[in-house]
Image (spheres, helix red, strand yellow):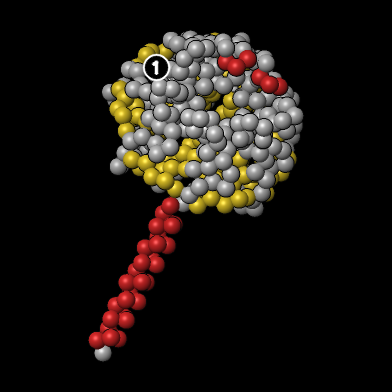
Amino acid sequence: MRQLRNITASLGLLAMSLVFSVASAQAQGTWKKTNNMSAARSGQTATLLKNGRVLVAGGENSIGNVKTAELYNPSTGIWASTGLPNVARASAAAALLSDGTVLVAGGCNTDCIGALGSSEIYSPSIGKWTLKGFMATPRFSFSATLLTNGNVLVAGGCTATNCTIVTNRAEIYNPTTGKWTATGSLKFARGNHTATRLSNGTVLVAGGANATNDLRSAELYNPTAGTWSTVSNMTNTHSGHVAVLLKTGKVLVAGGGGPPDSLAGAELYNPSTKAWTVTGSLKTGRDDFAGVLLQSGKVLVAGGANLAGAPLASAELYDPTAGTWSSTGTMTLARIEFTLTLLPNGQALAAGGTNGVNAFYSAAELYSP
């Protein structure tokens, strides 16, 4: 009888262990391949449409700039070609407008030997692109942010090959008139920065780089006044980093930069105090990676390049409550300069990218929390 009880107890412990192991695996998150895009591309734009599909446009590959666009359907996992953009552009910026159309502006031509000033609108209802006005300053690797009034703020960016020249100029696109107008200039010229619209409607621009250095500086745009004001500097330099608006209203900035920084630093911006505080560092330093806010409130970051420039397949989760990072499932492909889009079903779609040397990818995969 005692032997039977011991066997039963052992089986119970084994069952508990299996349950714990399964729960841990589920908590870790997994990546799974989905269908490939029709074209290999990196440095493309990816926009979640109001109908739940993802519009991917432009980018570059080994042949040159990609003058195509396609739609991903999360329900079927299938990509479908859509209308051809009017201009082949890489390192452009995109914004989903209030009416459900998509603005794509700027970018660079093949090999980024010149900046583009043109802009165009994609209409999901007819699957076509329409050319709009030109920005006063052609630019690539800049930011585009939808404001609460429905206008789009573009700021900073590179204007010459390899970002040897960056700009501090900012402009506003008005969807009603289809025109661009100048607004207040950034305090600091920068490219490869991030821009985050805060809950009060102001826009936080952080980090990036000028022609010679990665930056610690950050500033706020006031849409009402059309002016910029500086806030305190970040602790680390951040360029090619990720910035995510948390459910708390704070902004997480993580990764990016370069020596002497490790690419692993992370910090939080508090809109109430306009100050930064250091939070837990990434487990793996990385830049030119991607990140999204998951429905759970945690932040997923994945891929990018390490300090030596090698592509990464690893991914991590940031827990805002604990202020710490934990490893999560590894991507099926190590990739740099790809897009990561949160889908309505809670999954995240990673698409395209490069190994940073000679390979460009059409492969796509899904992260399930």
The residue shown at (63%, 31%) is: 357
The residue shown at (53%, 30%) is: 309
Coordinates of residue 294 in the picture (x, y in percent): 44, 43
- Eyeballing the image, is 147 above or below 11? above
| Residue at mark 1 | 217
Q: Residue furthest left?
A: 2
Q: Secondary structure at mark 1?
A: loop
The residue shown at (50%, 12%) is: 212
CA neighbours of label 1 inside 10 A, class few (<14), some (14 to 19), many (20+): many
Coordinates of residue 316 in the picture (x, y in percent): 43, 42
Q: Is residue 334 visible?
A: yes
The residue shown at (56%, 10%) is: 165
Count all numbered tags in the image, as a single digit: 1
Quadrant of the rendered image containing residue 130:
top right
Depth check: give the residue in front, 265 or 298.
265
Q: Residue furthest front?
A: 308
Which quarter shows the N terminus? bottom left
Coordinates of residue 8 in the picture (x, y in percent): 31, 81
In screen coordinates, is 254 left or right of 86? left
Quadrant of the rendered image containing residue 206:
top left
Coordinates of residue 330 in the picture (x, y in percent): 50, 47
Quadrant of the rendered image containing residue 181:
top right
Q: Is residue 124 visible?
A: no
Q: Residue furthest bottom?
A: 1
In screen coordinates, is 53 left or right of 316? right
- Eyeballing the image, is 249 above or below 172? below
At label 1, the amino acid type is Ser
- Eyeballing the image, is 38 above or below 168? below
